[in-house]
Amino acid sequence: MADTPPSTRTPGQPGPSTATTGTATTSTSRRPALSPSRASDFKQCPLLYRFRAVDRIPEAPSKAQVRGTVVHSVLEQLFALPAAERVRERAHELLAPTWRGLVAEQPELGELFDGADDPQLDSWLESASGLLDSYFALEDPQRLEPESCELRVETELESGVLLRGFIDRVDVAPTGEVRLVDYKTGAAPREVGEAKALFQMKFYALVLWRTRGEIPRQLLLMYLRDGQSLAYTPDEAELRRFERTLEAIWQAIQRAGNTGDFRASPGKLCQWCDHQQRCPEFGGTPPPYPGWPEPDPGVETALDRAD
Ligand code: SF4
């Protein structure tokens, strides 16, 4: 691992061309980038950011996280079907094959259950069906034609900070107005995750604005566990402030990357943290600082996106 911290170009200096949504340029794809999950980690607790992005200590995926990945994938597949086929029954039919496909790609996920006959697997798939039912109670996918699903987005801010992430769904109205949609399937109560979810949505709104020159008309969070949705309308002044917030977070990450000083910041989200055993707040000791990782520490996993 290299021990140099992430760097950004000098403000005002020409940088690499901005990547457009949906693709990544080779010039920027390996540069350190900020993702909403990692930015949110640092904001929540710098030490958590370190464990995840720098030490890259594997975390055991929970059944709820994997269920979220499966449900996100089913919804993506659903929108790839002709509108007439986007019905509840079809979504349910996609669940088991999607789970099997995920296990074929990542066999370790199969260890969450005691084989294909584990009765817990049936009840887990049943709970995923419940999330899909919840989705269908919130909207009718037959009436929608998203511009894209699971869209990879990337942009470089004027300051040189590179932002990267995936948007669950982008809807564009006939009038051209853009709506960004995010499905929430996680185990945490809505009130605990709401600030984090809005942070993530503003991140995507900023990236879209900077790549397309248009501020999304609406950010829509769909909470499939409790069948509620939250719509939010960002404005330019707010996104400008948010841009400065992200730049400040990136500068703080750079400082911490230089020194290895990633402080623990305990809070109510500690109860979902996989790293309590090595966290000083819980009597643990972090491993020696390994230095800044190569390549990109900003990578998000499918599990990150399925919270
Ligand atoms: S347990 Fe809490 S304080 Fe410790 S690393 Fe995790 S989030 Fe941070």
Image (cartoon, rainbow, N blue to C red):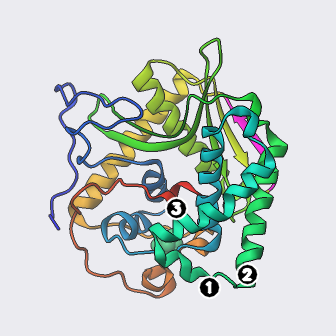
Q: Quadrant of the C terminus?
A: bottom right
- Label 3: which residue? 303
Circles 1 and 2: CB atoms closer than 8 Å: no
Q: Amino acid at mark 3?
A: Leu
**Residue visible at 65% across and 56% down?**
71
Residue lying furthest top: 175
- Label 1: which residue? 115
Query: For this rendering, which residue is in front, 298 or 276?
Result: 298
Residue 69: where, in percent of width, then height?
58, 59
Q: Quadrant of the N terminus?
A: bottom left
Query: For this rendering, which residue is in front, 125 or 240?
Result: 125
Side (left or right) of 28 relative to 84: left
Side (left or right) of 274 relative to 224: left
For marks 1 and 2, the one nearer the N-term is 1
- The stretch in magenta equals 226-232
**Residue visible at 22% across and 64% down?**
259
Query: For this rendering, which residue is in front, 114 or 6?
Result: 114
Label 3: element kind: helix
For marks 1 and 3, the one nearer the N-term is 1
Label 1: element kind: loop
Q: Is residue 251 above or below residue 283?
A: above
Label tally: 3
**Residue visible at 18% across and 34% down?**
10
Disc 1 to disc 2, how far (Cα)? 10 Å
Query: For this rendering, which residue is in front, 96 or 297?
Result: 96
Side (left or right) of 186 relative to 255: right
Checking the image for residue 120, the label placed there is 2
User: Where on the picture, by quarter, is residue 11?
Assistant: top left
